[in-house]
Image: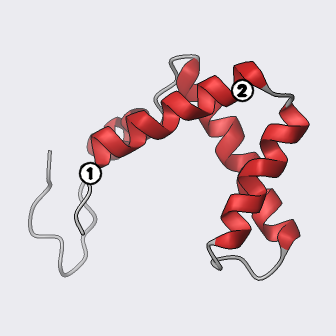
Amino acid sequence: MSYNIVFTAGLDAYHFNKARAEFSEKDHLNAIADRMYQTKKYDSYSAAMGAAIVIYDYQVMLAEGVQVNRDARKELQRQPLPNTVGYAYQVV
């Protein structure tokens, strides 16, 4: 199954902001951690909670207009290409 990353990310951000407005931070974080733990990608609940906290902070930054990935990409584009085999061109 294929997903549209822009639509999926936007929809998830919408639900994050709705839940953030409707529930306490503690309840919201616990719900995110529960869901992440259910994916079986985390060996422990504490690892899932750590990831949930990072996601929570990132989503708050997005809601405040901070575009971490855009800014990181711009910074990478300003750097000279590494002199390494396999880097024949720079994608812009």
Mark 1 Cα within 10 Å, few/some/many (few <14, many 20+)? Answer: few
Residue holding disc 2: 20
- Horizontal side of residue 59 vs 50, given as left or right: left
Residue at x-position 9% and y-position 61%: 89
Give the image's coloring scheme: secondary structure
Whether pointer 1 and pointer 2 mark residues with C-beta atoms closer than 8 Å, the reply is no
* Residue 26 screen position, x and y as percent: 90, 38
The three-letter code of the residue at mark 2 reads: Arg
Indicate the secondary structure of the residue bearing disc 2: helix
Q: Which of marks 2 and 1 precedes in the sequence?
A: 2
Q: Quadrant of residue 40?
A: bottom right
Q: Quadrant of residue 11?
A: top left
* Residue 43 screen position, x and y as percent: 76, 82
Residue holding disc 1: 80
* Residue 31 screen position, x and y as percent: 77, 49
The image's mark for residue 50 is none
* Residue 44 screen position, x and y as percent: 83, 77
Asked if one can make out residue 79 in the rendered structure from this viewpoint, the answer is no
| Quadrant of image for the N terminus | bottom left
Residue at x-position 87% and y-position 28%: 24
Indicate the secondary structure of the residue bearing disc 1: loop
The three-letter code of the residue at mark 1 reads: Pro
| Quadrant of image for the C terminus | top left
- Where is 24 relative to 65, above or below? below
Of marks 1 and 2, the one in the foreground: 2
Asked if one can make out residue 16 in the rendered structure from this viewpoint, the answer is yes
- Horizontal side of residue 69 vs 91, given as left or right: right
Residue at x-position 70% and y-position 37%: 57
How far apart are the alpha carbons under marks 1 and 2?
Answer: 41 Å
Is 10 or 58 nearer to us in this picture? Answer: 10
